[in-house]
Amino acid sequence: MTASAESSSDAARVVLSADDVRRAITRIAHEIVERNHGPASLVLVGLQRGGVWMAEALAEVLAGIDPANPVPVGTLDVSFHRDDVGLRPIVPGSVTDIPVPLDGRTVVLTDDVLFTGRTVRAALEALNDYGRPRAVQLAVMVDRGHRELPIRPDFVGKNLPTSRDEQVAATREGVVIR
């Protein structure tokens, strides 16, 4: 099918370019440092799979802001903590890797897209297996609304109103709606 033959509902719409994503990551990193009075007690934890690239990108920027205080980066698979297990099969995304004890630290959970809030709820439950953080904050590249739980991000790259049936993909290369 040629591009001209595609229906407008099948066409992808670029919302943020790679440069826009880079600028959003830089802004979020500065907001994190400002809110937490520096990066010394922070741990970034990317939610598998979409939030991992964001945690890594934030760590790179934070290293440039305060090279003396590198921020540990971990990953968290929430597959076994989801509340919709009966509605879909459990497919572990990847191995969880939390590189430092979380007790007394501020954990910044990162995810690519915040939609219903159910993945974040599962992440909060999964974090309990790794200690008791002093605080948990949430950074997302895209907040698209449609929350089913009372969860709100602390740091947002872009608020993007969408319909429930649209799909949003957020990567280092950009944000696209289908």
Image: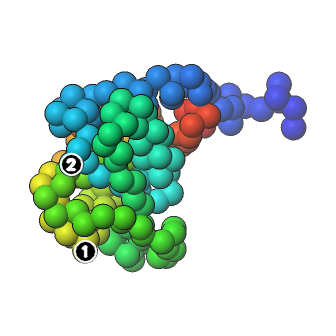
Seen at 18% across and 55% down, the residue is: 105
- Which residue of the protein is positioned furthest toward the right in this rendering? 2
Q: Position of residue 79 (x, y in %)?
A: 41, 71
Q: Please, what is the three-letter code of the amino acid marked with disc 2? A: Ser
Q: Nearer the viewer, residue 17 or 115?
A: 17
The quarter of the rendered structure image containing the C terminus is top right
Q: Which residue is mark 1?
A: 129
Seen at 53% across and 39% down, the residue is: 170
Residue 87 found in image quarter: bottom left
Question: What's the CA distance linking mark 1 and mark 2?
Answer: 19 Å
Badge 1 or badge 2: first in the primary sequence: 2
Name the side, left or right, on which 177 lies relative to 36: right
Q: Where residue 41 is drawn, which disc sits there?
A: 2
Q: Residues within 10 Å of mark 1 (few under 14, many from 20)?
A: few
Q: At numbered mark 1, what does the secondary structure look like: helix, strand or loop?
A: helix
- Viewer can see residue 120: yes
Name the side, left or right, on which 67 lies relative to 19: left
